[in-house]
Image: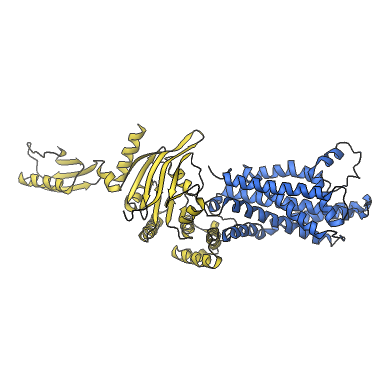
Amino acid sequence: MIGFYTLWKREMVRYLKGSLDTIAPPIISTILFIFVFGLALGSRLGAVGEFPYIQFMLPGVMMMSVIMNSFYNPAYSVFQSRWQGNIADFLASPLSYSQMAVATILAGMCRGMIVGLIVLGAAFAFTSLPLAHPGLMALYLVLVSLAFASFGCIVGLWTKGWDGVNAVSIFLLDPLVMLGGVFYSLEMIRGVPILEVLTQINPFTYITGGFRYSLLGIADTDPFVGLGITAMLGVGLLLASIALFWRGYHLKH
Amino acid sequence: MKAERIAISFQHLHKVYPNVLAVKDLTLDIQQGEFFGLLGPNGAGKTTSIQVIAGLVKPTSGQVIVNGLDAVRDYRRVHRMVGVMPQEEVLDSWFLSVREILVYNAGYFGIPAREAGRRADELLERFDLGEKRSAKVSELSGGMKRRLLLAKALIHNPEILILDEPTAGADVALRRQIWQLMSELNAQGKTILLTTHYLEEAERLCERVAILDRGELLAVGPPAELTRSSHRDFVEIELASSAPRDLKLPGLNYTVENGKLRLAGTLEDEHVLEVLNALAREGVKISAIHAERARLEDVFLEITQGFRK
């Protein structure tokens, strides 16, 4: 376990030492979202159900920051170690391939959850949230960060350059998150062509909806469907990451 | 040879990269406690062969057995026994200090933090890096980086040390320092597998060497034996007076030209004595003697060039 702990610690130290570059930017951008969409525009959008727009939006914004930070940490770290060559330190050690994958993913999950909780704390500076189901919220945080840290690990192994990580974020994650009900409810887009269909078939809608339920106690999707999707993604992508490490995908010649 | 047990056994190791045959059916045993050299020009397959042990290359077929364990199947146990110093200056340099690099590497090998710190401090002092313990890798000179790489390979006190071109690019002083360190480690009982371009290094340090080219093993043996088999020793005797025309030195390959008698081939001391006695008997005076043993470099060139033809 010392080897596993050391690798996890290395991954944590990697982003905590550069926290001005890693932790601060997502927090600042999330606060800007809250400020612009929640406070400036929210008052004109009125209430969504029984909640003012800013309260409705916050769980989605928090989820977005958890997803992105969980994803970026292992994606950049794994690619950086491959690119720099110091991945050999892990590969030539007695760490098992599953320990390498899980330690990397766990550190990504920690970053996602740290940023998510800071955003939640910051949100209380602007408004209040009922925290309707804290246990479910914690479960969502763990499973969402597991799924996207595992996905980041896979992308870090797959990519041939830094741009690959950004491309996956821009072409895949951003559209899924933006069209996943972060800023609107299904009711608000009822009848809007394309957007309604895209939102309804997007699994992120159920993840965001479920997480919103855990915080606010209201949902326009079944929170347990969202939980099931998140759990399946989490476990599936974790196993896929371990399998890729085991195969030495882009690690061994 | 210091021990009977085999430390590393390459068994029909074969590695093909897309369109490139890197290692061809390599079968070779290295004994425990041995100082062994893998020699060969660029692209000979030296690094690929040792990277199989380090878990960085998957063999196409064949296997490498380390102290009785398969390097691929039992990689975790094999890695505990092996320290690898890579050819490139690859260090986890971005956010860790010199000391932290060693401590973290010890951690990957399951060494508790306190013991890891103690070993790191000891190695930093031993390798003259004590003053740089808090520095970043970017602040180190090339020689310091090489010493740090060696310290990193030793942090878990491995039985087997694999050094891939450890003195490449090192200046004379550093090269001698690394030679000294390697000799000390071997004297402590560690098996050392060295790859090198520097034949002088192999000749000076290795008990046995293997010569590889284009993935094929061409020769194995102690450097002295390989050089003896090359028949390239050379002795030149400058004559102060002319040699008699009917001078006979049976069984020796020699020429007399411009007042110089040249002997070539595999020459033992008695051969030279025999010639000197024959010249003395004939009353020929000698003004100088130059002798040159065949060097590993000659053997290496002979073998690899012969192979390429």
Task: Point out residue B202 in the picture as x, y percentages from the top left corner.
Answer: 35, 49
Image quadrant where residue A106 sits:
bottom right
- Return the residue nearer the eye: A133 or A93: A133
A214 w.r.t. B309: above or below = below
Task: Point out residue B172 in the picture as x, y percentages from the top left corner.
Answer: 38, 54
- Return the residue nearer the eye: A53 or A248: A248
Chain B: give its colour.
yellow
Q: What colouring does the structure picture have? A: by chain
B121 w.r.t. B31: above or below = below
Task: Point out residue A61 in the picture as x, y percentages from the top left corner.
Answer: 81, 52
The residue that appears at 60% across and 51% down in the rendered structure is: A98
Image quadrant where residue B185 sits:
bottom left
- Residue A33 visible from this viewpoint: no
Q: Is residue A73 left or right of residue B47?
A: right
Q: How many marks?
A: 0
The residue that appears at 84% across and 62% down in the rendered structure is: A125
